Amino acid sequence: MRQMTTTQQTTKWRLRGKGYEFCNCAPGCTCNFSGFPSSSDGSCKAFVGNAIEEGFCGEVDLSGVTAIAMLDWPKAIHDGGGKVVFIVQPDTTEEQIGCLAQIYTGQLGGNPWAILGATYEVAGLVKTPITIDGTGLKITMSADGVGSASGDTFKNPVTGEPHEAQIVLPDGFIWTKGECGVGSFTAVAEGLDMTYKDSNWIYYEFDWADDR
C-alpha cells in the first residue's frame, strides 16, 4: 500500500460512521466483559464493516469510504498473533488506501487502532464491491467474491417478537454503546477462511480520532 507523504508525527485523522461487527463469540461477546472470547476453540474471528460517513487523514478526504476487516486471532485479541485482510470498494483511491493502512495498523496513533494494530499482521488487501443493506440490527453486508454476513435482533422465545438488547461501555475503546443481536457470516480471502452461524452481531456508531 502506498504511504502518505505527510509524516507520521504530524498527520491528524478522524473517522465517524457506522460499525457492523460480526464475530464467532456467543451473542453479546464476552471479550467486551472479561477480555476472552466465548468461541468453542477460544479463537476470535470476525467480519467487521466500517461505513465512514465523515473522515479525513491529513489532506485526504475519507468521507463515504466503506471498508471491511476480515480478522483472525488464534486466541484472545490481546494475545496477538492475528491476521487481517482489508477489503475496500474498487473506487477507493490509492491515497485513501494509504491513509486507512496507516490508521488501521496503528501507525498514526489513536484508539482503537493503536491497540488493535499491534495484535495482527496484514495478510492482504482486496478491492471489490461492498454492499450494506438494511437498518439497525436487520442488516446484510457483502463483499463480492469474499463473503457475506447477515444480522437480526434477538427474538422473544415465547412470542417471537424482536427483543432489544444493548451493551453500554463507558470506557469502551472501540464503541461505547452497541446494539446486540444474532448474526451469521462466511468469508474466504488471502488464506483466511471462516464460517459461523447464530453468533455475535453488534451494530454501533463510532467516532475515532488520533490522540494528539
Image: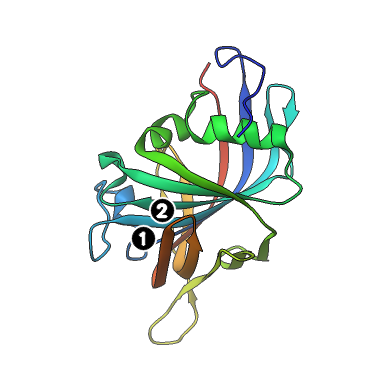
Q: Nearer the viewer, residue 126 or 41?
A: 126
Name the disc covering residue 121, or none.
none
Q: Is residue 140 left or right of residue 39?
A: right
Against 192, is 108 above or below? above
Q: Residues within 10 Å of mark 2 (few under 14, many from 20)?
A: some
Amino acid beneath label 1: Gly
Against 49, is 170 above or below? above
Tell me what residue is drawn at x 29 percent, y 55 percent: 30
Location of residue 136 in the rendering, given as x and y in whole percent from the top left corner: 60, 62
Tell me what residue is drawn at x 74 percent, y 22 percent: 59
Tell me what residue is drawn at x 49 percent, y 23 percent: 109
**Which SS class for mark 1?**
loop
Amino acid beneath label 2: Ile
Q: Nearer the viewer, residue 137 or 50?
A: 50
Residue at numbered disc 2: 167
Q: Is residue 164 visible?
A: no
Name the disc covering residue 28, or none.
1
Location of residue 89 in the rendering, given as x and y in whole percent from the top left corner: 69, 51
Q: Nearer the viewer, residue 136 or 87?
A: 87
Q: Indicate the quadrant containing the N terminus: top left, top right, bottom left or bottom right.
A: top right
Count of numbered circles in the view: 2
The picture quadrant where one finds residue 158 is bottom left
Q: Looking at the image, tell me whether mark 1 or mark 2 is earlier in sequence order.
A: 1
Location of residue 129 in the rendering, given as x and y in whole percent from the top left corner: 70, 59
Whether pointer 1 and pointer 2 mark residues with C-beta atoms closer than 8 Å, the reply is yes
The picture quadrant where one finds residue 198 is bottom left
Q: Is residue 32 visible?
A: yes
**Which SS class for mark 2?**
strand
Question: What is the C-alpha distance between the residues marked 1 and 2?
Answer: 8 Å
Against 52, is 38 above or below? below
